[in-house]
Amino acid sequence: MKKNIKISLFLLYFIFLFPLFLTFILGGASSSRVVSGSLSVRNYGEIIAIGFGFFFVSTNFKFFSDHCFNNKYLKPFFYLSFLYIGSTIWSDFRLLTFFRSTEFFIVGVLSLVVYSEFSTVDNKFSHKGLRRYLYHIIIIAILSGLIKKIAFSELVIKYNFLADNASALLFSGCFLICFYQNFFLKEKNKLFPFLFFVVVFICNSLTALVTIVVCIFYLYLSRFGEKKKNLFLIIMLTTLVFYFFISDLKFINELLSYVSFRDIERIESLTGRENVWLLTIQELDGKILGSGFATDMHILMNSMMNNQINVVSSGHNVFLESYIAAKYLGIFLVLYSFYFWFKKAKICFQKNHAHLVEALVFFSLISGFTSSGYGGSLVSHPYILFWVTFTPLMVTYNNEK
């Protein structure tokens, strides 16, 4: 492995784990300037970690330029990164927006070059190499979840003890890849049974469960030609838009309540997300370009002071979080990213992998309705490392077809 790739991989571990280790050693709450008005120990650790990442990328500009900056298939990521960094200009909290948008960019380029190195063998895509990348992001996610529990609460080993929606999506996305390799490509791998255990016992969520079932069915339909899977895609997207933005579908609520053993009232209110979304949109009323990237928690402070919500939280919705950053321009670039990579799958990959790439884009798009992810503000979570798995980065050197 090349030296710069080793350093990039080390920095990914460092960026996600060092702030938590620092908090565990020095103590401190998980709250930050959003609630307390001052930076936490974790925040200082994040600043130090991203500082090292920024220094490495800037001092090795040619290396990153050759490996990803000049790749035309990564245009959506760079467009969105520059928009988010640019949102510092109209942000209500400029230092926060500049730091989080820089973090989005730095973590993105580091993960892209590591993924490219692992998944490219003899200038061709390697499923075994892809699993190597998955090993590392799974380890980062598990260690991050464990250290977070130890540092901020207590670690009790029980069913769903990590209880983190973003981690559940990361594990489920990795499971989807290994499921496809194991059953569709007949590539047996040890990661598959381990991920099944993780998804079922350690960390799961309703969003992850629904998304993975839908995407597996999409992969199944891909075996019968384009028409059936495209019809299913259109039906699912139409249903999602109608359900989240127009009106609840009672039979869906009842089904989700049944399979998740949750009260239907929690399903109908999207476990409290719906109220957060409405309050966020109200706070943005009158702002031409939004309030800047990663300001979703800040703009809800007034709502918490007025007892409209108990605690401030992230938007839990990629499209809402991009809307907060730059209103409709932000939403457009996120949707453009998904559309761009979905369409490029058939151009850049062989047929047996193109279907998987499409399913991964579909996975991220669906989960984005109730969780953060690519384009969202939760950039300090390891789930941000997953989106690179559906980018055709390796075609910088050779187009598989």
Image (cartoon, rainbow, N blue to C red):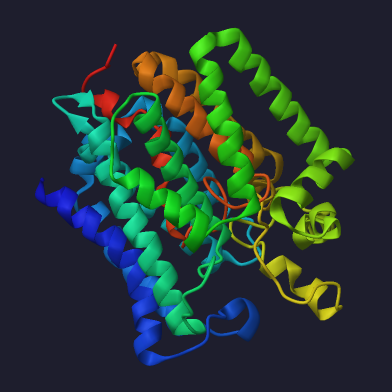
Q: Residue at x 77, y 31 (%)?
A: 239
Q: In the displayed structure, would residue 27 be above or below residue 380? A: below
Q: Is residue 61 above or below residue 270?
A: above
In what quadrant of the picture does the C terminus appear?
Answer: top left
317 horizontally vs 357: left or right:
right
Q: Quadrant of residue 233?
A: top right
- For the residue pair 307 and 88, the one nearer the viewer reads as 307
Answer left or right for 369 relative to 59: right
Q: Residue at x 52, y 45 (%)?
A: 374
**How many marks overall?**
0
Question: Residue 170: horizontal and vertical position, in percent?
Answer: 47, 50
Find residue 389 and report its image quarter.
Answer: top left
Residue 213 visible to an observer of this rendering: yes
Q: Position of residue 163 (x, y in %)?
A: 56, 66
390 displayed left or right of 36: left
Residue at point 50%, 83% (across, down): 152
Left or right for 17, reference 59: right
Where is residue 352? Give x, y as percent.
Answer: 37, 18
